[in-house]
Image (cartoon, rainbow, N blue to C red):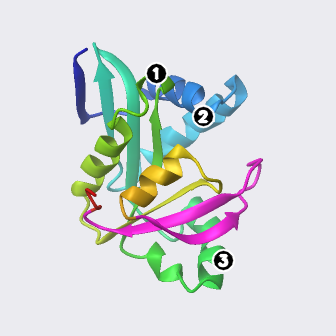
Amino acid sequence: MDLVIGSLDLSAHVDEALAVQAVAFGLGPDEVAVRRQIVLRHMTYPGARALGATADGNLVGFVYGMPNDRTHWWSTVVEPYLRANGHDHWLDDSFVITELHVHPEHQNRGLGRSLITTITDGAAEPRSILSAIDTDSPARALYRSLGYQDLAGQVLFPSAPKPYAVMGAPLPLSRG
């Protein structure tokens, strides 16, 4: 299998990326339609960039992120939780990992690790933040192995059925 990680024009490949996310994250067509608009909007933000992983020419994983901006929706939701834990300064000078998804058939092979470390290696910011479902999971284990620590838990996003945790790590990420 020819696996390649490289820059991804996410706006041009949004439907392929969301197909991966739908399988990896269990999204239905209505959720995909909402996320499509969000992704396209995010890719217009200054500094937003994406990487894709292809296997034999098919997109099997992607990551995208951007420098954090306290006026963005995500920041306005997580800020009170971070402030309550004394961590709201993490919203400044941080690169946000907005989405990271790998098709289940390609998980547990280091692809997620390669995607997140490669995109953060190109960040000018001294740290990275992200949110993940607040439960023990392979994703959370990956983030912890890279140096991410919980900054806030039980974060409730409107319309999200499960609470999230906000995690942060200094850059560069640990290769541990």
Q: Earlier in the sequence, mark 3 or mark 1?
A: 3
Q: Nearer the viewer, mark 1 or mark 2?
A: 1
Q: Earlier in the sequence, mark 1 or mark 2?
A: 2
**Quarter of the rendering containing residue 95:** bottom left
Residue 97 seen in the current view: no
Up the image or down, 55 lies above or below 150; here it is above
State the residue position of label 3: 80
| CB atoms of marks 3 and 1 within 8 Å | no
Q: Nearer the viewer, mark 3 or mark 2?
A: 2
Within the magenta stretch, is there residue 43? no
Distance in Å between CA atoms under marks 1 and 2: 13 Å
Q: Give the magenta range.
A: 148-172
Residue 22 seen in the current view: yes
* Residue 105, label in figure: 1
SS class, disc 2: helix
Does residue 129 appear left or right of residue 38 in this picture? left
State the residue position of label 2: 25
Relative image position of residue 44 (x, y in whole percent): 41, 47
Residue at position x 61%, y 83% from top? 85
Q: Nearer the viewer, residue 172 or 69?
A: 172
Relative image position of residue 36 (x, y in whole percent): 56, 33
Relative image position of residue 151 (x, y in whole percent): 54, 73
Up the image or down, 85 lies above or below 19; here it is below
Residue at position x 60%, y 34% from top? 25
Q: Earlier in the sequence, mark 3 or mark 2?
A: 2
Distance in Å between CA atoms under marks 3 and 2: 26 Å
Residue at position x 65%, y 67% from top? 153
